[in-house]
Amino acid sequence: MERVQLIVTERDERGGRAMSRLRRQGMIPGVLYGAGKAALAFSVDAHALRTAMSTDTGRHAVLNVVFEGKKRGHSAVIKEIQLDRVKHIVSHVDLHEIHLNEPIETKITVQLEGTAKGVKAGGLLDITLWEVGVRGLPTDIPEHLTLDVSEVDLGQVLRVKDLVIPKELSLLEDPEETVLSVILPRGAGVEEEVPAASEPELVGKGKEGEGAEE
């Protein structure tokens, strides 16, 4: 997995007012945590953070965090993102420093390839799992996993065990968990029940012998 560079600025200001001022300036406050190291507070340009999270790996990207004025970068992953409750935009980000020679646990996006046979026949692709958890060295983790759905027919299911996982990685998901299936659209294939026609009732016919002359 290629590292995504993220330039940040070390900050000394703390507290709600300082955080609000940063956000008005288009900056996002954050903290870089590291095992056995003191946490480093920083601010990052909101656009730069969105760009770093817009790659194929999304918020699971391995970042190369570089503090302004420093030459050495920090390999890190996004630990937590806080969103503004009203605007639903990022208001704070926590990063966790990692070592490239030590395994990490992360998520990989599943990208679909091809058009399923069942979809061509009128079915719908029902996707239940867009990403899977894996464990491995950051340098061995691909940006995404490709899943060919071309041969999936109506009623068929693809599971986690059908994914091709690099041998260097350990899968953290249940192999039997469903990734996707091809289903019939709601109501398709169900014939509307038509009530059987009843025999018409004869009107005007009297009882046998009724109406005969006395």
Image (cartoon, helix red, strand yellow):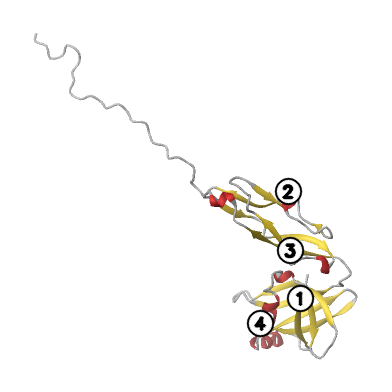
Q: Are marks 4 and 3 in contact (CB under 8 Å)?
A: no
Q: Find residue 166 and report its horizontal and vertical position in percent.
A: 80, 59
Query: How far apart in space, not on screen, are marks 3 and 2 (Cα)?
Result: 17 Å
Q: Which residue is mark 2?
A: 176
Assign a secondary structure to mark 3: strand
Query: How far apart in space, not on screen, are marks 4 and 3 (Cα)?
Result: 23 Å
- Who comes first in sequence, dot 4 or dot 3? 4
Please tell me whether residue 87 is drawn above or below residue 202 in the rendered image.
Answer: below
Q: Which residue is mark 4?
A: 47
Q: Please tell me whether mark 4 or mark 3 is closer to you in this view.
A: 3
Q: Quadrant of the C terminus?
A: top left
Q: Please tell me whether mark 4 or mark 1 is closer to you in this view.
A: 4
Assign a secondary structure to mark 1: strand
Q: Which residue is mark 1?
A: 94
Q: Residue furthest bottom?
A: 69
- Who comes first in sequence, dot 2 or dot 1? 1
Residue 49 location, quadrant? bottom right
| Amino acid identity at mark 3 | Ile
Residue 140 location, quadrant? bottom right
The answer to whether residue 148 is seen in the rendering is: yes
Query: How far apart in space, not on screen, are marks 3 and 1 (Cα)?
Result: 20 Å
Query: How far apart in space, not on screen, are marks 4 and 2 (Cα)?
Result: 39 Å
Left/right of residue 75 with respect to residue 55 in the rendered view? right
